[in-house]
Image (tube, rainbow, N blue to C red):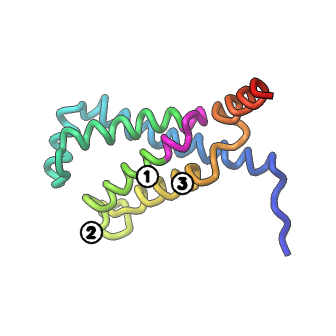
Amino acid sequence: MTRPLPASTGDVAVLVARIVLGLVLIAHGLQKLVSYGFAGTSASFEKMGVPLAPVSAAYATLAELGGGILLVLGAATTLASALIVLDMLGAFVLVHASKGVFVDKGGFELVAVIAAGALLLAAFGPGRFSVDHALAGRKAKASA
């Protein structure tokens, strides 16, 4: 039988996962916003057959950049994670699923891993080292 890790170890693991996932998302959001620009991202989405390309491009950019920042901070983690899962689900269904697994062929491995990580954060929370945890502690003290 295995013993669970101490809570502090789990909190550190969640912190590292949140930061890595958040940084990847921030990079992709900034790429859409700065490197490609809104027009370029919209045109790219339209070329890939994404419906309502301008709206979808705005959503993806905001979910990735804003959601990534929130994940790094551990703030509004459940909401940010849910929006990221929705973003990745759209990318999976509309663009990547038909291209197989491997990212070098346009496949779904990156969007699936991001979605899985965000889903875990939505389900289990941001851990002790987060803005959400600090705010919950303040709220609990104020109501006591």
Residue at 37% across / 60% down in the picture?
103
Marker disc for residue 117: 3
The quadrant where residue 94 appears: bottom left
Residue at 64% across / 52% down in the picture?
124
The quadrant where residue 100 appears: bottom left
Q: For the C terminus, which image quadrant? A: top right
What's the distance in space between the residues labelled 3 and 2, CA to CA? 22 Å
Residue at 47% across / 53% down in the picture?
114
The reply to whether the magenta stretch includes residue 97 is no
Marker disc for residue 98: 2
Q: Mark 1 or 3, which is nearer the eye?
A: 1
Circles 1 and 3: CB distance less than 8 Å? no
Circles 3 and 2: CB distance less than 8 Å? no
Q: Is residue 103 above or below residue 32?
A: below
Instruction: Please tell me whether the stretch drawn in magenta is mainly helix, strand or loop.
Output: helix
Q: Is residue 38 left or right of residue 85?
A: left
Residue 3 horizontal/vertical position (percent):
85, 66
Magenta residues span: 71-81
Task: Give the residue type that dot 3 points to.
Answer: Gly
Which mark is first along the chain, 3 or 1? 1
Task: Give the residue type that dot 2 points to.
Answer: Ser
Which mark is first along the chain, 2 or 3? 2
Packing grade of label 3 (10 A; few <14, some 14-19, many >=20) is some
* Residue under label 1: 85
Packing grade of label 1 (10 A; few <14, some 14-19, many >=20) is many
Task: Give the residue type that dot 1 points to.
Answer: Val
Residue 67 horizontal/vertical position (percent):
46, 38
